[in-house]
Image (spheres, helix red, strand yellow):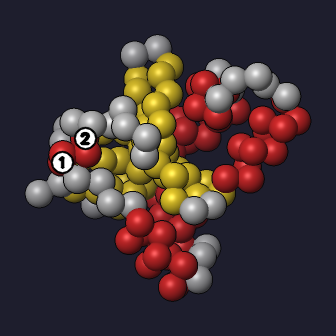
Amino acid sequence: MLQIVFNEISAAEISQLDTLDQLELLDSFRVTEDDLEHLDDDRFGKMVRNVKILHRFRSKDWRFYFEVADGKVIVHRILHKNTFQDFLFRSKLPVGEDEALAQSKQFWRLIDEGRNAKTLD
């Protein structure tokens, strides 16, 4: 069975939503073992920094940023889409969202903060 692990930060981000919105959002984040073999399809984005790979899953106005490690899906951040749309708009970057994020130091600081947070197993 595939284990999905939220760290303190991603759990806090989702807990700020109303209970029904939380349930709907978590229900939409369906990642199966089969999905892990097809993370290059349209449902997932991919960002690379050094040798680390981070994946993005879109659900309505929210983005799950996660990595796969030791057979687990580790959710580092759950962020509202406007956070990065505003960034892209202000920056006027002529590249896609995932590529722009992969080049953003601020984005990776958010992710590193999530990676370093305690996981809630």
For the N terminus, give its image quadrant.
bottom left
Viewer-proximal residue among 93 and 9: 93
Q: Distance between the residues labelled 1 and 2?
A: 5 Å
Residue linked to disc 2: 36
Q: Could you tell me if the residues under marks 1 and 2 are in contact, i.e. CB atoms within 8 Å?
A: yes
Tell which residue pokes out farthest to the top in this image. 50
Decide if residue 21 is on the left or right side of residue 43. right
Are there few (<14), some (14-19), or many (20+) residues within 10 Å of tag 2?
some
At horizontal 25% and vertical 45% (from top left) the residue drawn is 35
- Residue 77 pos. (x, y %): 52, 50
Per the image, label 1 sits on a secondary structure element best described as: helix
- Identify whether 96 is placed above or below 60: above
Viewer-proximal residue among 94 and 14: 94
Residue linked to disc 1: 33
Q: Can residue 106 be seen in this view?
A: yes
Per the image, label 2 sits on a secondary structure element best described as: helix
- Residue 5 pos. (x, y %): 32, 56
- Residue 40 pos. (x, y %): 36, 32
Residue 108 image-quadrant placement = top right
At horizontal 58% and vertical 31% (from top left) the residue drawn is 98
Decide if residue 68 is on the left or right side of residue 106. left
- Identify whether 96 is placed above or below 31: above
Q: Which amino acid does label 1 sit on?
A: Glu
- Identify whether 113 is placed above or below 7: above
For the C terminus, give its image quadrant.
bottom left
Are there few (<14), some (14-19), or many (20+) residues within 10 Å of tag 1?
few
Tell which residue pokes out farthest to the left in this image. 1
- Residue 42 pos. (x, y %): 43, 40
Q: Which amino acid does label 2 sit on?
A: Leu
Q: Can residue 115 be seen in this view?
A: no
Viewer-proximal residue among 44 and 47: 44
At horizontal 41% and vertical 23% (from top left) the residue drawn is 52
